[in-house]
Image (cartoon, rainbow, N blue to C red):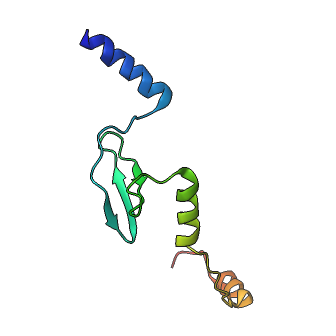
Amino acid sequence: MTWITNLLGFFYDIIFGCRHWSQTRPFTLEQQTYKVCLDCGKQIYYSTERMTPLSAREVRRMKATANPVTVIATSMNAGGFLTRRANKSNAAA
């Protein structure tokens, strides 16, 4: 009887993925609270106010606001770089 439930569980995992039954306690690292599935290793983000897992929409919002993209303009003398490269010899000494 147990081999039937193991077989059905195996096919369920293949079709639907991990069920995340074995999880750690919620913990916070770098201002993000989450649980980790001990079977597949997936991070399940967690709300500390409601003590429930976050929805996919809440996770997207959290990631969008947590890592703002900053663009830093740099000035590079492209002409000097290309001329130094052109003057370099490929011959062995």
Q: Residue furthest left?
A: 2
Q: Position of residue 81 (x, y in %)?
A: 67, 86
Q: Position of residue 44 (x, y in %)?
A: 41, 51
Side of 21 where 57 appears, left or right: right
Side of 1 where 17 appears, left or right: right
Q: Residue furthest right?
A: 79
For the residue pair 61 and 89, the one nearer the viewer reads as 61
Q: Position of residue 79 (x, y in %)?
A: 74, 88
Residue appearing at x 35%, y 46% in the figure: 41
Q: Is residue 61 above or below residue 30?
A: above
Q: Is residue 21 above or below residue 1?
A: below
Q: Is residue 79 above or below residue 24?
A: below
Side of 7 where 57 appears, left or right: right
Residue appearing at x 37%, y 39% in the figure: 20
How many tags in the picture?
Answer: 0
Q: Position of residue 21 (x, y in %)?
A: 33, 37
Q: Is residue 44 above or below residue 4?
A: below
Quadrant where the image shows the N terminus:
top left
Q: Residue furthest front?
A: 50
Residue appearing at x 55%, y 51% in the figure: 56
Q: Residue furthest top?
A: 1
